[in-house]
Image: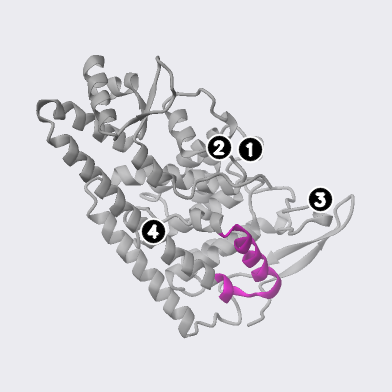
């Protein structure tokens, strides 16, 4: 169904006038057309979310999985914006192993981890709100690239997407004097006003609306993707925030941008909803399957270690530490475990002989070891995108 999802307003700002898009308040009018196929997709996505939440509830150490999934999401979401870091880069950066790492890119990913952690913690005391969104943005851009672009503040100047200026841009969001009005309307919709919409549909609609408003000078894409997971957690659909759509958006990046624009130009919300709900179902199923694969890997490796008698004790402790951090040096291991360096070194050597750990530097000193099979599972889909 063709509908107007917003209006274009003329902005007479030197050096040339341009037209900016102001989205209409949600939900769409005329109302969404939930035909049988779209309703089936909604049911499938809700079922997949339930399966994922159930899988997370029986994990022996959900914090371990959450920690690594947060890092993977941070990497993928930042890659969509053009960073070229890898998961190994991020893990090395967090452990102060800085050799050969693209620092600007990896710092950007690290800040996303901080923003995501902060947002999840703040949800315990603060509902989804403009205040929370601004605080998360402030953490995201607090340091490094983008810190000069008003972290935590809605923009007071015009931005645009594509092109060299608003006059030749692919898309121009609302003028700055309309941003607060638009964001206030979005906040009301998130809280179920003027009418309550099923949660996944609300998340889908709100994501497009946020991206169309583009309320910040930088970091809009990352905050907009984060908003999806925060909303699912705030509503209690996910007890453990293991659903992140950045891999799906990254894989279908061109389609993603085309559908966002189709909502603005044609009011085609239904095509976007089909894409979004397919992404939720696919991503939730993949996350549940990945958790199961990792559990099986850990169990199989524990069994291989457990038959080794007395030396198995220290090896199991080292193995468990690598589950929390797949790339480590003997020095870091020694500090984390409180064991002697010779004991740790012996355990690492035994784990290498079993093929569980691998040395990744080729050096004789300051060597780094990786739990390769584990990192390979986590790394799936994290290959950097080619530069635009």
Of badges 2 and 4, the one in the foreground is 4
Q: Where does label 1 land, which residue?
A: 146
Q: Separation of disc 4 and disc 3 at Cα?
A: 40 Å
- 180 vs 149: above or below: below
- Ranked by sequence position, the earlier of labels 4 and 1 is 1
- Ranked by sequence position, the earlier of labels 3 and 2 is 2
Residue 286, percent across and down?
39, 58
Of badges 1 and 2, the one in the foreground is 2
Quarter of the N terminus within the rendering: bottom right
Among all residues in the image, which is located at the extreme right? Answer: 15
Q: Separation of disc 1 and disc 2 at Cα?
A: 9 Å
Asked if the residues shown at circle 3 and circle 1 are in contact, with their CB atoms under 8 angstroms apart, the answer is no
Local crowd size for mark 4, using a 10 Å CA cut-off: few (<14), some (14–19), many (≥20): some
Is 253 one of the magenta-colored residues? yes
Of badges 4 and 1, the one in the foreground is 4
- Ranked by sequence position, the earlier of labels 1 and 2 is 2
Residue 152, percent across and down?
57, 43
Please tell me which residue is depicted at 27% across the width and 61% down the height of the picture. Answer: 54
Asked if the residues shown at circle 1 and circle 2 are in contact, with their CB atoms under 8 angstroms apart, the answer is yes
Residue 381, percent across and down?
48, 50
Q: Separation of disc 4 and disc 1 at Cα?
A: 33 Å
Q: What stretch is highlighted in magenta?
A: 252-272
Q: Where does label 3 land, which residue?
A: 165
Q: Separation of disc 3 and disc 1 at Cα?
A: 19 Å
Q: Residue 272 carries which label?
A: none
Local crowd size for mark 1, using a 10 Å CA cut-off: few (<14), some (14–19), many (≥20): some
Q: Nearer the viewer, residue 357 or 220?
A: 357
Residue 223, percent across and down?
54, 50
């Amino acid at each position: 169904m063709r509908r107007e999802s917003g209006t274009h307003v003329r902005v007479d700002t030197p050096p040339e006038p341009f037209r900016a898009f102001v989205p209409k308040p949600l939900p769409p009018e005329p109302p969404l057309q939930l035909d049988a196929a779209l309703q089936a997709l909604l049911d499938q996505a809700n079922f997949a979310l339930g399966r994922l939440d159930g899988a997370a509830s029986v994990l022996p150490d959900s914090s371990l999985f959450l920690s690594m999934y947060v890092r993977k999401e941070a990497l993928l979401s930042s890659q969509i914006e053009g960073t070229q870091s890898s998961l190994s880069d991020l893990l090395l950066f967090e452990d102060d192993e800085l050799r050969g790492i693209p620092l600007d890119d990896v710092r950007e990913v690290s800040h996303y981890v901080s923003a995501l952690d902060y947002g999840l913690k703040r949800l315990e005391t603060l509902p989804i709100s403009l205040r929370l969104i601004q605080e998360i943005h402030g953490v995201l851009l607090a340091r490094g690239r983008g810190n000069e672009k008003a972290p935590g503040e809605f923009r007071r100047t015009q931005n645009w997407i594509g092109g060299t200026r608003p006059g030749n841009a692919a898309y121009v969001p609302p003028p700055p004097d309309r941003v607060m009005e638009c964001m206030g309307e979005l906040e009301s919709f998130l809280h179920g006003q003027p009418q309550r919409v099923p949660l996944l549909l609300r998340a889908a609609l709100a994501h497009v609306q946020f991206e169309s408003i583009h309320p910040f000078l930088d970091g809009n894409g990352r905050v907009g993707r984060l908003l999806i997971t925060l909303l699912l957690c705030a509503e209690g659909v996910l007890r453990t925030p293991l659903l992140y759509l950045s891999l799906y958006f990254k894989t279908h990046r061109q389609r993603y941008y085309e559908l966002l624009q189709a909502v603005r130009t044609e009011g085609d919300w239904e095509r976007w909803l089909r894409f979004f709900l397919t992404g939720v179902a696919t991503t939730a199923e993949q996350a549940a399957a990945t958790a199961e694969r990792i559990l099986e890997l850990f169990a199989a490796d524990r069994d291989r270690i457990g038959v080794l008698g007395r030396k198995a004790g220290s090896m199991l402790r080292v193995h468990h530490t690598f589950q929390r951090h797949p790339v480590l040096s003997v020095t870091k291991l020694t500090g984390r475990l409180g064991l002697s360096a010779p004991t740790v070194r012996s355990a690492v050597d035994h784990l290498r002989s079993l093929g569980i750990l691998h040395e990744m530097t080729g050096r004789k000193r300051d060597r780094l070891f990786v739990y390769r099979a584990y990192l390979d599972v986590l790394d799936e889909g994290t290959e950097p995108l080619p530069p635009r």
